Image (tube, helix red, strand yellow):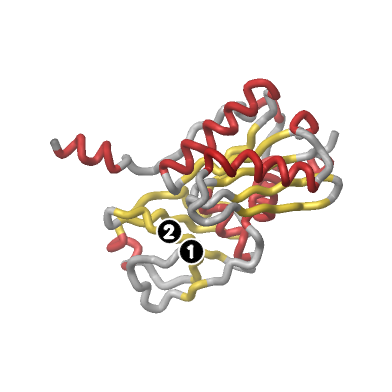
Amino acid sequence: MSVNAMRMLALDLSGGVAEAGLAVAGMRLHARGREGAPHSTTLLPMLERLLSRGRIGWRDVDLFALVVGPGSFTGLRIAAATLAGLNSALQRPVVPLSALAVTAIQCEAAGEVCVCEDARAGACYFGRYRAGEACVPDACLPWEQVLRMPPAPYAARQALPVRLPGWRRVSLRLPRGVAMLRAASLRLAQQDSLDALPRYPLPVYLQPSQAERYARRS
């Protein structure tokens, strides 16, 4: 079966709100959870409704895509654990995705775009992308370092805690669920074999958690 014909389910909790996408029968469907809704009671029903819209069941899914970070530590853990539970029986390949790469694809920018997200503690999750491909590795940088960079077009999912003088914010045009599917397709085009993909990808945090920072100070 060609990659384009595969039925793929994508999941993202890196921003706190559940986002999902489903590629099936030439369609790219997407779903978004409610702000503040508890994942424990709403995530699986949201995914099942999405599968129902595509008229398939769990065993019809050929592979998954999962945003592994950076982003909300709690969201990333819940997403990884949820997918691990589903995949314990299905054993489907999983395409790990960068949250910043997905945001860059949402822009549909013709040229290079930076992605900046608040990492708290005076830091920024930073990436630079062109056509969905990373120009530099994703990083967690102090805002002071970002402010010293030459102004550039940038994207962000939420309001930033600092102003970026001279920088131009780019609108997010694509639904995130659709952008996840595009990001996964780009990753799959670089894979020699689906067997090389993980079944249980781990979150990528890029920085220590608040608890870990407190432990280091004590």
Q: Quadrant of the N terminus?
A: top right
Q: Is residue 53 above or below residue 44?
A: below
Amino acid type for the residue under numbered disc 2: Glu
Q: Quadrant of the C terminus?
A: top left
- 86 or 109: which is nearer to us? 86
Looking at the image, residue 4 sits to the left or right of residue 98; the answer is right
Which residue is tagged 1?
A: 156
Residue 190 falls in image quadrant: top right
Q: Position of residue 129 (x, y in %)?
A: 54, 58
Task: Identify the element where label 2 is drawn.
Answer: strand
- Disc 2 to disc 1: CB gap under 8 Å: yes
Amino acid type for the residue under numbered disc 1: Ala
Density class for disc 1 (Cα within 10 Å; few <14, some 14-19, many ≥20) is: many
- 19 or 116: which is nearer to us? 19
Sequence order check, earlier mark of 2 and 1:
2
Residue 68's mark?
none
Q: Residue at x 15, y 39 (%)?
A: 217
Which residue is tagged 2?
A: 117
Q: Residue at x 77, y 29 (%)?
A: 59
Distance CA(mark 2)–CA(mark 1)? 6 Å
Density class for disc 2 (Cα within 10 Å; few <14, some 14-19, many ≥20) is: many
